[in-house]
Image (cartoon, rainbow, N blue to C red):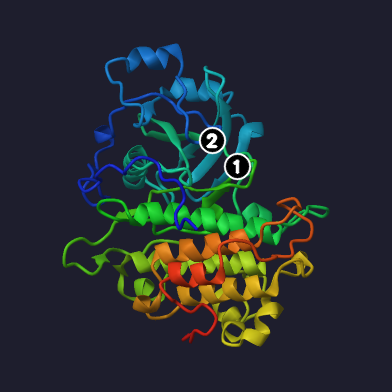
Protein backbone atom coordinates (compact mmCIF):
# COMPACT_ATOMS: atom_id res chain seq x y z
CA UNK A 1 0.00 0.00 0.00
CA UNK A 2 1.14 3.46 -0.75
CA UNK A 3 1.32 5.43 2.45
CA UNK A 4 0.86 8.85 0.93
CA UNK A 5 -1.51 10.45 -1.53
CA UNK A 6 -0.32 11.91 -4.79
CA UNK A 7 1.43 15.08 -3.79
CA UNK A 8 1.42 18.29 -5.79
CA UNK A 9 4.78 19.79 -6.77
CA UNK A 10 7.32 20.27 -3.98
CA UNK A 11 6.18 23.11 -1.68
CA UNK A 12 8.04 26.34 -2.14
CA UNK A 13 10.32 27.53 0.61
CA UNK A 14 8.22 29.58 2.99
CA UNK A 15 11.03 30.34 5.42
CA UNK A 16 10.80 34.11 4.93
CA UNK A 17 7.09 34.36 5.64
CA UNK A 18 5.64 34.29 9.13
CA UNK A 19 2.98 36.20 10.96
CA UNK A 20 5.65 37.85 13.08
CA UNK A 21 7.64 38.92 10.02
CA UNK A 22 5.10 40.24 7.51
CA UNK A 23 4.46 44.01 7.25
CA UNK A 24 1.86 45.40 9.60
CA UNK A 25 0.91 48.43 7.53
CA UNK A 26 -2.32 48.20 5.55
CA UNK A 27 -0.46 49.61 2.58
CA UNK A 28 2.05 46.78 2.66
CA UNK A 29 -0.26 44.02 1.50
CA UNK A 30 1.02 41.33 -0.83
CA UNK A 31 1.26 42.41 -4.47
CA UNK A 32 -0.95 40.44 -6.84
CA UNK A 33 0.50 38.03 -9.32
CA UNK A 34 -0.91 35.19 -11.35
CA UNK A 35 -4.29 34.04 -12.62
CA UNK A 36 -7.40 32.74 -10.96
CA UNK A 37 -7.88 29.05 -10.30
CA UNK A 38 -10.42 26.49 -11.41
CA UNK A 39 -12.62 25.51 -8.49
CA UNK A 40 -13.61 22.14 -9.88
CA UNK A 41 -10.91 19.89 -8.50
CA UNK A 42 -8.40 22.33 -7.10
CA UNK A 43 -5.83 20.98 -9.54
CA UNK A 44 -6.51 22.94 -12.73
CA UNK A 45 -6.03 26.63 -13.43
CA UNK A 46 -8.48 28.93 -15.14
CA UNK A 47 -8.00 32.37 -16.62
CA UNK A 48 -9.58 35.31 -14.86
CA UNK A 49 -11.47 38.14 -16.53
CA UNK A 50 -9.90 40.12 -19.35
CA UNK A 51 -9.44 43.02 -16.94
CA UNK A 52 -7.56 40.79 -14.50
CA UNK A 53 -5.36 39.43 -17.28
CA UNK A 54 -4.57 42.91 -18.49
CA UNK A 55 -3.49 44.07 -15.04
CA UNK A 56 -1.34 41.02 -14.47
CA UNK A 57 0.07 40.30 -17.92
CA UNK A 58 3.60 41.06 -16.73
CA UNK A 59 3.66 38.05 -14.45
CA UNK A 60 3.21 34.48 -15.62
CA UNK A 61 3.28 32.78 -12.19
CA UNK A 62 -0.15 31.15 -11.90
CA UNK A 63 0.51 29.80 -8.39
CA UNK A 64 0.15 33.19 -6.72
CA UNK A 65 -3.24 34.69 -5.89
CA UNK A 66 -4.38 37.55 -8.13
CA UNK A 67 -5.66 40.94 -7.04
CA UNK A 68 -9.31 41.92 -7.43
CA UNK A 69 -10.81 45.37 -7.27
CA UNK A 70 -13.55 45.94 -4.71
CA UNK A 71 -15.91 46.72 -7.59
CA UNK A 72 -15.27 43.30 -9.16
CA UNK A 73 -16.15 41.52 -5.93
CA UNK A 74 -19.16 43.73 -5.25
CA UNK A 75 -20.44 42.86 -8.72
CA UNK A 76 -19.71 39.16 -8.16
CA UNK A 77 -21.85 39.12 -5.01
CA UNK A 78 -24.55 41.52 -6.25
CA UNK A 79 -23.30 44.16 -3.81
CA UNK A 80 -22.94 41.57 -1.06
CA UNK A 81 -26.60 40.72 -1.25
CA UNK A 82 -27.94 38.95 1.82
CA UNK A 83 -29.28 36.06 -0.26
CA UNK A 84 -25.65 35.31 -1.25
CA UNK A 85 -24.51 35.13 2.39
CA UNK A 86 -23.39 31.55 3.09
CA UNK A 87 -21.57 31.97 6.40
CA UNK A 88 -20.61 34.42 9.11
CA UNK A 89 -18.68 34.56 12.36
CA UNK A 90 -16.20 36.58 14.37
CA UNK A 91 -13.95 36.83 11.27
CA UNK A 92 -16.63 38.47 9.12
CA UNK A 93 -18.97 37.18 6.40
CA UNK A 94 -18.66 34.73 3.51
CA UNK A 95 -20.62 35.27 0.29
CA UNK A 96 -21.17 33.13 -2.76
CA UNK A 97 -20.23 35.00 -5.91
CA UNK A 98 -19.76 34.67 -9.66
CA UNK A 99 -16.71 36.25 -11.30
CA UNK A 100 -16.77 37.82 -14.76
CA UNK A 101 -15.27 34.58 -16.08
CA UNK A 102 -18.32 32.68 -14.82
CA UNK A 103 -16.36 30.96 -12.04
CA UNK A 104 -18.36 30.42 -8.83
CA UNK A 105 -16.35 31.44 -5.77
CA UNK A 106 -16.61 32.03 -2.03
CA UNK A 107 -15.70 35.57 -0.99
CA UNK A 108 -14.76 36.22 2.64
CA UNK A 109 -15.17 39.84 3.72
CA UNK A 110 -13.11 40.28 6.87
CA UNK A 111 -14.11 42.23 9.92
CA UNK A 112 -10.73 43.76 10.82
CA UNK A 113 -11.90 44.33 14.38
CA UNK A 114 -12.91 40.69 14.66
CA UNK A 115 -11.02 37.43 15.07
CA UNK A 116 -9.09 37.72 11.82
CA UNK A 117 -7.42 41.11 11.36
CA UNK A 118 -5.02 42.55 8.84
CA UNK A 119 -2.09 40.53 10.19
CA UNK A 120 -3.91 37.23 9.73
CA UNK A 121 -5.14 38.36 6.30
CA UNK A 122 -1.55 38.82 5.09
CA UNK A 123 -0.47 35.47 6.55
CA UNK A 124 -3.32 33.67 4.80
CA UNK A 125 -2.55 35.23 1.41
CA UNK A 126 1.15 34.33 1.76
CA UNK A 127 0.57 30.78 2.97
CA UNK A 128 -2.02 29.83 0.38
CA UNK A 129 0.00 31.48 -2.41
CA UNK A 130 3.00 29.33 -1.57
CA UNK A 131 1.40 26.04 -0.53
CA UNK A 132 -0.71 23.97 -2.93
CA UNK A 133 -2.22 20.55 -2.30
CA UNK A 134 -5.45 18.81 -3.22
CA UNK A 135 -6.48 18.83 0.45
CA UNK A 136 -5.89 22.56 0.96
CA UNK A 137 -8.52 25.06 -0.16
CA UNK A 138 -7.45 27.02 -3.23
CA UNK A 139 -7.04 30.78 -2.79
CA UNK A 140 -7.97 32.44 -6.07
CA UNK A 141 -7.30 36.02 -5.04
CA UNK A 142 -7.78 38.87 -2.62
CA UNK A 143 -8.73 42.53 -2.43
CA UNK A 144 -7.21 45.39 -0.42
CA UNK A 145 -9.31 48.48 -0.96
CA UNK A 146 -9.05 51.15 1.74
CA UNK A 147 -9.85 49.34 4.95
CA UNK A 148 -11.57 46.49 3.10
CA UNK A 149 -9.88 43.07 3.19
CA UNK A 150 -11.44 40.28 1.14
CA UNK A 151 -10.30 36.77 0.24
CA UNK A 152 -11.56 34.85 -2.80
CA UNK A 153 -11.58 31.05 -2.59
CA UNK A 154 -12.76 28.19 -4.72
CA UNK A 155 -16.37 27.42 -3.84
CA UNK A 156 -16.86 24.25 -1.78
CA UNK A 157 -20.47 23.22 -2.47
CA UNK A 158 -20.99 20.94 0.53
CA UNK A 159 -19.90 23.50 3.12
CA UNK A 160 -17.95 22.50 6.20
CA UNK A 161 -17.68 19.20 8.04
CA UNK A 162 -19.52 20.61 11.05
CA UNK A 163 -22.58 21.21 8.85
CA UNK A 164 -22.80 17.46 8.27
CA UNK A 165 -22.05 16.28 11.81
CA UNK A 166 -24.02 18.50 14.18
CA UNK A 167 -27.58 19.78 14.51
CA UNK A 168 -28.78 18.08 11.33
CA UNK A 169 -32.13 19.09 9.93
CA UNK A 170 -34.86 16.43 10.23
CA UNK A 171 -34.66 14.02 7.33
CA UNK A 172 -31.01 14.79 6.61
CA UNK A 173 -29.00 11.64 6.03
CA UNK A 174 -25.96 11.50 8.32
CA UNK A 175 -22.46 10.85 7.03
CA UNK A 176 -21.70 7.16 6.66
CA UNK A 177 -18.80 5.55 8.48
CA UNK A 178 -16.93 5.17 5.21
CA UNK A 179 -17.35 8.86 4.37
CA UNK A 180 -16.18 9.89 7.84
CA UNK A 181 -13.00 7.89 7.41
CA UNK A 182 -12.49 9.37 3.94
CA UNK A 183 -12.78 12.90 5.35
CA UNK A 184 -10.42 12.10 8.22
CA UNK A 185 -7.80 10.65 5.87
CA UNK A 186 -8.02 13.59 3.47
CA UNK A 187 -7.65 16.12 6.28
CA UNK A 188 -4.63 14.18 7.56
CA UNK A 189 -3.05 14.29 4.09
CA UNK A 190 -3.48 18.07 4.02
CA UNK A 191 -1.91 18.39 7.46
CA UNK A 192 0.95 16.12 6.43
CA UNK A 193 1.70 18.39 3.48
CA UNK A 194 1.91 21.39 5.81
CA UNK A 195 4.13 19.58 8.31
CA UNK A 196 6.50 18.47 5.54
CA UNK A 197 6.89 21.95 4.04
CA UNK A 198 10.28 23.67 4.28
CA UNK A 199 10.20 24.93 6.98
CA UNK A 200 7.22 23.07 8.43
CA UNK A 201 3.94 24.91 8.85
CA UNK A 202 1.86 24.54 12.02
CA UNK A 203 -1.78 24.94 11.06
CA UNK A 204 -2.93 25.93 14.57
CA UNK A 205 -6.64 25.99 13.73
CA UNK A 206 -7.68 22.47 12.77
CA UNK A 207 -11.37 22.02 13.54
CA UNK A 208 -14.48 20.67 11.83
CA UNK A 209 -15.65 24.12 10.71
CA UNK A 210 -12.35 24.62 8.86
CA UNK A 211 -12.62 21.36 6.92
CA UNK A 212 -14.53 22.14 3.73
CA UNK A 213 -16.10 19.52 1.45
CA UNK A 214 -16.63 19.24 -2.30
CA UNK A 215 -19.48 17.38 -4.01
CA UNK A 216 -17.72 14.05 -3.45
CA UNK A 217 -17.00 14.82 0.22
CA UNK A 218 -13.31 15.27 -0.46
CA UNK A 219 -12.01 17.51 2.35
CA UNK A 220 -9.87 20.64 2.11
CA UNK A 221 -8.35 22.55 5.00
CA UNK A 222 -9.22 26.26 5.06
CA UNK A 223 -8.54 29.44 7.08
CA UNK A 224 -4.78 29.81 7.40
CA UNK A 225 -4.70 33.15 9.20
CA UNK A 226 -3.34 31.54 12.37
CA UNK A 227 -0.75 29.35 10.61
CA UNK A 228 2.75 29.59 12.04
CA UNK A 229 6.13 28.45 10.81
CA UNK A 230 7.35 25.54 12.91
CA UNK A 231 10.66 25.14 14.73
CA UNK A 232 13.82 24.55 12.67
CA UNK A 233 17.33 23.44 13.53
CA UNK A 234 17.84 22.71 17.22
CA UNK A 235 14.65 24.48 18.26
CA UNK A 236 12.00 22.23 19.77
CA UNK A 237 9.09 24.65 19.73
CA UNK A 238 7.85 28.08 18.75
CA UNK A 239 6.70 30.45 21.49
CA UNK A 240 3.63 32.48 20.60
CA UNK A 241 0.44 33.87 22.05
CA UNK A 242 -2.22 31.22 22.49
CA UNK A 243 -4.70 31.24 19.61
CA UNK A 244 -7.14 28.72 18.24
CA UNK A 245 -10.55 27.35 19.22
CA UNK A 246 -11.57 26.13 22.65
CA UNK A 247 -11.88 22.37 22.79
CA UNK A 248 -9.32 21.80 20.03
CA UNK A 249 -6.22 23.34 21.68
CA UNK A 250 -3.44 21.03 22.89
CA UNK A 251 -3.06 21.30 26.70
CA UNK A 252 0.65 22.13 26.66
CA UNK A 253 0.10 24.90 24.12
CA UNK A 254 -2.85 26.34 26.06
CA UNK A 255 -0.82 26.41 29.28
CA UNK A 256 2.61 27.55 28.05
CA UNK A 257 2.20 29.06 24.57
CA UNK A 258 4.82 26.58 23.30
CA UNK A 259 3.71 25.48 19.86
CA UNK A 260 4.94 22.35 18.04
CA UNK A 261 3.76 20.14 15.20
CA UNK A 262 2.31 17.85 17.87
CA UNK A 263 -0.10 20.65 18.80
CA UNK A 264 -1.82 20.04 15.46
CA UNK A 265 -1.87 16.29 16.16
CA UNK A 266 -3.93 16.88 19.29
CA UNK A 267 -6.42 18.95 17.27
CA UNK A 268 -6.56 16.13 14.73
CA UNK A 269 -7.49 13.79 17.57
CA UNK A 270 -10.39 16.05 18.57
CA UNK A 271 -11.68 16.11 14.98
CA UNK A 272 -11.47 12.30 14.89
CA UNK A 273 -13.48 12.20 18.11
CA UNK A 274 -16.13 14.42 16.52
CA UNK A 275 -16.32 12.12 13.50
CA UNK A 276 -16.65 9.01 15.69
CA UNK A 277 -19.11 10.39 18.22
CA UNK A 278 -21.07 13.01 16.30
CA UNK A 279 -20.55 15.35 19.27
CA UNK A 280 -19.05 18.86 19.27
CA UNK A 281 -15.60 19.55 20.70
CA UNK A 282 -17.27 21.84 23.19
CA UNK A 283 -21.02 21.97 23.61
CA UNK A 284 -22.61 24.26 26.18
CA UNK A 285 -25.98 22.59 25.62
CA UNK A 286 -24.67 19.46 27.36
CA UNK A 287 -24.78 19.08 31.13
CA UNK A 288 -21.62 19.83 33.18
CA UNK A 289 -19.02 17.12 32.76
CA UNK A 290 -20.16 16.36 29.23
CA UNK A 291 -19.54 19.73 27.59
CA UNK A 292 -15.87 19.08 26.75
CA UNK A 293 -15.68 16.19 24.30
CA UNK A 294 -12.21 15.01 25.33
CA UNK A 295 -13.19 14.95 29.02
CA UNK A 296 -16.45 13.15 28.25
CA UNK A 297 -14.74 10.54 26.07
CA UNK A 298 -11.89 9.78 28.48
CA UNK A 299 -13.58 6.82 30.26
CA UNK A 300 -14.50 5.27 26.92
CA UNK A 301 -11.00 5.64 25.47
CA UNK A 302 -9.47 3.77 28.43
CA UNK A 303 -11.59 0.64 27.94
CA UNK A 304 -11.89 -1.11 24.57
CA UNK A 305 -15.14 -2.72 25.68
CA UNK A 306 -16.69 0.75 25.85
CA UNK A 307 -15.59 1.95 22.41
CA UNK A 308 -18.90 1.04 20.80
CA UNK A 309 -20.83 3.09 23.38
CA UNK A 310 -19.26 6.36 22.22
CA UNK A 311 -20.18 5.96 18.54
CA UNK A 312 -22.58 8.42 16.90
CA UNK A 313 -26.07 6.87 17.32
CA UNK A 314 -27.03 8.12 13.85
CA UNK A 315 -24.73 5.47 12.34
CA UNK A 316 -27.15 2.79 13.59
CA UNK A 317 -24.33 0.29 13.98
CA UNK A 318 -23.32 0.47 10.30
CA UNK A 319 -19.57 0.06 10.82
CA UNK A 320 -17.01 -2.66 11.43
CA UNK A 321 -16.20 -3.15 15.12
CA UNK A 322 -12.59 -3.96 14.21
CA UNK A 323 -12.32 -0.79 12.13
CA UNK A 324 -13.85 1.21 14.98
CA UNK A 325 -11.29 -0.18 17.43
CA UNK A 326 -8.45 0.95 15.18
CA UNK A 327 -10.01 4.39 14.66
CA UNK A 328 -10.55 4.97 18.38
CA UNK A 329 -7.02 3.78 19.19
CA UNK A 330 -5.54 6.21 16.64
CA UNK A 331 -7.67 8.96 18.15
CA UNK A 332 -6.51 8.16 21.67
CA UNK A 333 -2.88 8.32 20.60
CA UNK A 334 -3.42 11.77 19.10
CA UNK A 335 -4.94 12.93 22.38
CA UNK A 336 -2.06 11.84 24.61
CA UNK A 337 -1.45 14.50 27.25
CA UNK A 338 2.30 14.29 26.70
CA UNK A 339 3.02 15.75 23.27
CA UNK A 340 6.01 13.50 22.56
CA UNK A 341 3.76 10.42 22.94
CA UNK A 342 1.53 11.54 20.06
CA UNK A 343 2.23 9.98 16.65
CA UNK A 344 3.75 11.75 13.66
CA UNK A 345 1.27 12.86 11.02
CA UNK A 346 2.77 10.38 8.52
CA UNK A 347 1.81 7.50 10.85
CA UNK A 348 -1.72 8.85 11.14
CA UNK A 349 -2.02 9.12 7.36
CA UNK A 350 -0.84 5.54 6.93
CA UNK A 351 -3.29 4.24 9.55
CA UNK A 352 -6.28 6.18 8.22
CA UNK A 353 -5.56 5.19 4.61
CA UNK A 354 -5.59 1.59 5.81
CA UNK A 355 -8.97 2.07 7.50
CA UNK A 356 -10.42 3.70 4.37
CA UNK A 357 -9.32 0.65 2.38
CA UNK A 358 -10.93 -1.60 5.00
CA UNK A 359 -14.21 0.29 4.78
CA UNK A 360 -14.53 -0.02 0.99
CA UNK A 361 -17.88 -1.46 -0.04
CA UNK A 362 -20.37 -1.32 -2.88
CA UNK A 363 -22.74 0.96 -0.95
CA UNK A 364 -22.98 4.76 -1.34
CA UNK A 365 -20.57 7.00 0.53
CA UNK A 366 -23.14 8.81 2.58
CA UNK A 367 -25.48 6.08 3.71
CA UNK A 368 -26.05 2.36 3.56
CA UNK A 369 -24.44 -0.56 5.28
CA UNK A 370 -20.67 -0.59 5.34
CA UNK A 371 -19.43 -3.91 6.59
CA UNK A 372 -15.76 -3.05 6.56
CA UNK A 373 -14.80 -6.41 5.03
CA UNK A 374 -11.08 -6.90 4.81
CA UNK A 375 -9.39 -5.67 1.64
CA UNK A 376 -5.81 -4.87 0.80
CA UNK A 377 -3.40 -4.03 2.31
CA UNK A 378 -2.74 -7.01 4.54
CA UNK A 379 -2.47 -6.84 8.32
CA UNK A 380 1.27 -7.39 7.99
CA UNK A 381 1.60 -4.44 5.58
CA UNK A 382 -0.31 -2.23 7.98
CA UNK A 383 1.86 -3.15 10.93
CA UNK A 384 5.01 -2.67 8.86
CA UNK A 385 3.98 0.67 7.40
CA UNK A 386 3.16 2.06 10.82
CA UNK A 387 6.59 1.07 12.10
CA UNK A 388 5.17 -1.70 14.27
CA UNK A 389 3.13 0.86 16.21
CA UNK A 390 0.37 -0.92 18.12
CA UNK A 391 -2.99 0.79 17.74
CA UNK A 392 -4.94 -1.75 19.76
CA UNK A 393 -2.97 -2.17 22.95
CA UNK A 394 -1.96 1.37 23.76
CA UNK A 395 -1.91 2.98 27.14
CA UNK A 396 -3.76 6.25 27.27
CA UNK A 397 -3.03 8.94 29.84
CA UNK A 398 -5.47 11.78 30.50
Q: Quadrant of residue 355?
A: bottom right
Alpha-carbon neighbours of circle 2 within 10 Å: few (<14), some, or many (≥20)?
some
Q: How many marks?
A: 2
Residue 218 placement (x, y as % from top left): 58, 47
Q: Residue 275 versus residue 148: which sits nearer the camera?
A: 275
In the picture shown, does residue 64 fall above or below 365? Answer: above
Q: Label 1, on which residue?
A: 214
Q: Look at 31% across and 44% down and name the residue there.
A: 11
Q: Look at 67% across and 86% down and name the residue there.
A: 305
Any mark on residue 41, and which?
2
Residue 186 lies left or right of residue 338; in this view the side is right
Whether residue 10 is visible here, answered yes or no, is yes
Q: Look at 39% across and 59% down and name the residue there.
A: 204
- Give the structural element (helix, strand or loop) at label 1: loop
Residue 324 lies left or right of residue 202; in this view the side is right
Any mark on residue 253, and which?
none
Q: Cβ–Cβ below 8 Å for labels 1 and 2? A: yes
- Furthest toward the right, the residue is 171
Q: Residue 23 versus residue 223: which sits nearer the camera?
A: 223
In the picture shown, does residue 96 fall above or below 174? Answer: above
Q: Which sits earlier in the primary sequence, circle 1 or circle 2?
A: 2
Alpha-carbon neighbours of circle 1 within 10 Å: few (<14), some, or many (≥20)?
some
Residue 178 placement (x, y as % from top left): 67, 58
Q: Residue 303 versus residue 138: which sits nearer the camera?
A: 303
Q: Residue 148 versus residue 259: which sits nearer the camera?
A: 259
- Give the structural element (helix, strand or loop) at label 2: loop
Whether residue 281 is visible here, answered yes or no, is no
Measured in 3D between alpha carbons, the distance from the residue under mark 1 to the one under mark 2, in whole angstroms, is 8 Å
Q: Quadrant of residue 96?
A: top right
Q: Look at 47% across and 63% down and name the residue there.
A: 350
Amino acid sequence: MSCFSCMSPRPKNVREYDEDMVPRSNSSAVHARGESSDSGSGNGRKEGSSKGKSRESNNQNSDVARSFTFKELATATQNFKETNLIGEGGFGCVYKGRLDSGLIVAIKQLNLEGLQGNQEFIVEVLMLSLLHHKNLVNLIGYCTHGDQRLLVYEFMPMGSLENHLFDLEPGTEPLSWRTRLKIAAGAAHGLEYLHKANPPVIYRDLKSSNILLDNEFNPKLSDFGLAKLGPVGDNTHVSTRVMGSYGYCAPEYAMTGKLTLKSDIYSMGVVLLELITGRKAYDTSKKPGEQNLVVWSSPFLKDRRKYVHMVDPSLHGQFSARCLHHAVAITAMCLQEQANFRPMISDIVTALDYLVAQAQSSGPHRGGSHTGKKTSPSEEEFNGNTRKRSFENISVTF
